[in-house]
Amino acid sequence: MTILSGIQPTSNIHLGNYLGAIRNWVSLSRAQNATPQNSLFCVVDLHAITVAQDPAKLRQAVLEAAAAYLACGLDPAHNSIFVQSHVSGHAELGWILGCQTPLGWLYRMTQFKDKAGKDRDNSGLGLLAYPALMAADILLYKATQVPVGEDQKQHVELTRDIAGAFNHQFGENFFPLPEPLMMGEATRVMSLRDGTKKMSKSDASDQSRLNLLDDADTIADKIKRAKTDPDALPSDAAGLANRPEARNLLTIYAAVQGKSLADVLPEVGGGQFSGFKAKLTAALVDHLPPIGQRMQQLLADKAYLQQVLTTGAANANAIAKPTLQGVMELMGLR
Ligand code: TRP
């Protein structure tokens, strides 16, 4: 089993990234006593540039994302932690797989439709090719398990199709077909201002998300203002139907403590939002600021961060090289 995942570098690594992704990577990696050879986590900077980025902000965001991986508990002795663009095989295999991917498959992707919007012809080719690059990220290491949030499942399924088509045409069983791994209670953390919208770094309102770098006062303030509804909290899951804000806040409350919704519903059911918000704030303040502080320490020691990323890229490259060589031989490029 080989695990690979990544998130885009953004200057607002938030609770959704933590609960929906990084925290799950840490438990997966620990559970299988991973090695840098079978557990790889990258900061996908080449995916980030599929939309416009400010160069200085991007450079800083890559470091922040790497610091977040480490601060959340990913151990560089057991995982390859690296930046996508530092391993040239991603771009090379991305091109090769792009040549094998029918446009029809790419046009169908929900994320492309959302991001390109009505004015498709004005979006960059990279936005359309995005899933072929993601397939390259995964297949370069012959990864078998890909922990992702719900919204990325479609891209992992497309990766399976791309791998299957490649195997069929060039070499049966060359690529294993990767499985998307959806983990834990909070695979979808929603906006604090609108329980039907995903928590996102690109939301104009910072009140909509909890960032890993937020301090205790900021967290308390954001929870205080978080949208609710007028009813008391339900004591079973059925009572959450059509109550997206209640569901979201309860999900966050459970997940941040490593519990399930079913664990916390009896505890808070019947109570008012005001009392619950105090508990939620306490749980968040227990868990998030220590991570943020660790991130700040790491960001203050850039030499250490760079060293982790250099080692990670070297480990990753050693695995990627033979895969790329194999692909090129099968296709007649070598
Ligand atoms: N597309 C993913 C996201 O936006 C990030 C990503 C890029 C990724 N390459 C990947 C995730 C490979 C898993 C595996 O969240």
Image: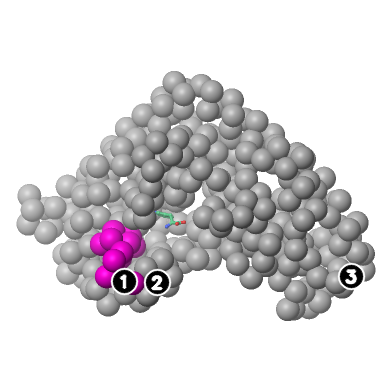
Who's the residue at 53% across and 66% down the image? 150
Label 1 sits on what residue type?
Arg
Give SS at disc 2.
Answer: loop
Q: Residue tagged by mark 2?
A: 117
Q: Earlier in the sequence, mark 2 or mark 3?
A: 2
Q: Residue tagged by mark 1?
A: 120
**Label 3 environment density (alpha carbons within 10 Å; few <14, some 14–19, many ≥20):** some
Who's the residue at 18% across and 64% down the image? 99
For discs 2 and 3, the disc positioned in front in the rendered view: 2
Q: Residue tagged by mark 3?
A: 232
Q: Do the residues labelled 2 and 1 touch (CB within 8 Å)?
A: yes
Q: Residue 49: where, in percent of width, then height? A: 34, 50
Q: Which of 288 and 201 is in front in this view?
A: 201
* Horizontal side of residue 329 vs 43, given as left or right: left
**Label 1 environment density (alpha carbons within 10 Å; few <14, some 14–19, many ≥20):** some
Q: Nearer the viewer, residue 184 or 289?
A: 289
* Horizontal side of residue 326 vs 5, given as left or right: left
The magenta region covers 119-131
Q: Is residue 122 magenta-colored? A: yes
Q: Residue 296: where, in percent of width, then height? A: 59, 29
Who's the residue at 71% across and 71% down the image? 244
Disc 3 versus disc 1: distance between alpha carbons?
45 Å
Q: Earlier in the sequence, mark 3 or mark 1?
A: 1
Label 3 sits on what residue type?
Ala
Q: Nearer the viewer, residue 324 or 32?
A: 324
Q: Is residue 334 magenta-colored? A: no
Up the image or down, 272 lies above or below 291; here it is below
